Each structure stands twice: as C-alpha cells, then as structure tokens.
Image (spheres, helix red, strand yellow):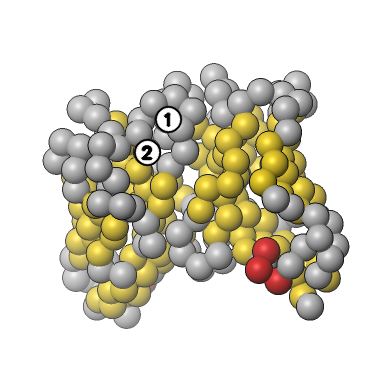
Amino acid sequence: EDKVVQSPLSLVVHEGDTVTLNCSYEVTNFRSLLWYKQEKKAPTFLFMLTSSGIEKKSGRLSSILDKKELFSILNITATQTGDSAIYLCASPRGGANNLFFGTGTRLTVIP
Amino acid sequence: GAGVSQSPSNKVTEKGKDVELRCDPISGHTALYWYRQRLGQGLEFLIYFQGNSAPDKSGLPSDRFSAERTGESVSTLTIQRTQQEDSAVYLCASSPGRQNTEAFFGQGTRLTVV
C-alpha cells in the first residue's frame, strides 16, 4: 500500500531557529514528491522534486530528495512567525497523477 | 478563472440533509481532485478526475458521497444524508494533468453538520 509519512507531527521553535521537516514515502512507480504550505485553508505549492540529490531552494526554504532511502527533507533557516503553518508532502499515486498526501507537520514559530 | 474557485465557502446544514459543493478549476486543467480535511488532520483523498477517463473514486468513504464533472469544467461533490462526522473542510484542486505538474488548491468549503 502506498504511503507518505511525515515527521515530526508538530514542532515549536523560536524565531531565528533552523528546522528540518521529514517526509518518507513508499509509492509504486514513484515520479515526484511535492511540498505544500497550508496556513489557513488552501495549501500553496512550495517545491516539486524528481531527482535525487538536487536541492531546490526558494529564499530561506530548501528541499532535497533521496530516492535511494525514499525520503525528502524541507529545511527552513532563520525561521519567522510567518513560517507558522502545516507543511504537507505528497506524491502521485501509482501510475496516475492522483496526489497522495502525508498527515503534515504543524510548525509553530514563536517570537 | 485565475485560480480554483469553490463555493460556498461555508455551509452549515442539519444532519440528514443533502449538500452540494462546487469547484471551478483553473481553465484548461484536465485533472481535478477532491480532498477532505477534518480538524487537525491531513488531507484525505476522495476522488480524482482526469480528462475523459473514468474517475478514481477509491477515496469516497461511503455511498453517501458522489461527485460529477462535466468535461474539463465544473465539478460538484454531493453528500447525501449528512452526518456529523462529515463536518470538515472540503478542498478541491486542479492541475494541467501532465506528469510532474503541481496541483493548485481552492480555498475550500467548510462544512458543519449540526
């Protein structure tokens, strides 16, 4: 059975800290892994990873994929209160584009 | 439209009533997804439409749930005889349908069954 597992489930840090969020997966016919940020209702897209070892970066956020060990990490450096959100990872299930999500990591950044 | 549009944004209904939730995908997007998110939980897959292919209904939790999509346009998710455990945010997303493309989400419909 396909699965996407995120850890930790929740995390509380102080502004300025660096955090690493984890996503492990077991997906048949793996093609890509996606990260989303959910602040209120609508998740917003962060990164799509398809190749091992190639870091994707956007400002203070970066992500990398390890297709041998079947996991991805999302790093956030110099965290700000605006980074408080649920971070979701997802992968297309099987041979289709049907996105299957993990349960998410709830990040809280306190001043 | 510019983004995925869902309506209504909030819906309160009495237990036992039927509800219809609407999703307008981004124009040209062939793939459309429905997810359910209960309070404090992750996104639970419900149904996936891709072009004219038969939809993937494997996530629908019971026969009270159904969804339709006309071509590559609007989709409606119908919940019959609503129960209190149906209370959740229902999120719709669309994507171009090609491999390795991200999905774009609407703002969701918050359903409360009282």
Q: Chain of mark 1?
A: A
Note whether B53 is above or below B112 in the view shown: above
Q: Are marks 2 and 1 in contact (CB under 8 Å)?
A: yes
- Mark 2 burial class by Cα count in 10 Å: few <14, some 14-19, many 20+: many
Quarter of the rendering containing residue B21: bottom left
- Look at the picture and state if A88 lies above or below B83: above
- The three-letter code of the residue at mark 1 reads Asn
Q: Residue at x 61, y 60 (%)?
A: A86
Q: Look at mark 1 in the image and give the residue it sits on.
A: A97
Numbered marks: total:
2
Q: Quadrant of the C terminus of chain B?
A: bottom left
Q: Are marks 2 and 1 on the same chain?
A: no
- Residue at disc 1, secondary structure: loop
Q: Dot 2 corresponds to which residue?
A: B95
Depicted B84 relative to depicted A35: above or below: below
Image position of A99 (left or right of B110): right
Q: Is residue A46 above or below residue A95?
A: below
Identify the residue at horizontal 67%, vertical 56% (top origin). A105
**Visible in this render: residue A47?**
yes
Q: Chain of mark 2?
A: B
Q: Amino acid at mark 2?
A: Ser
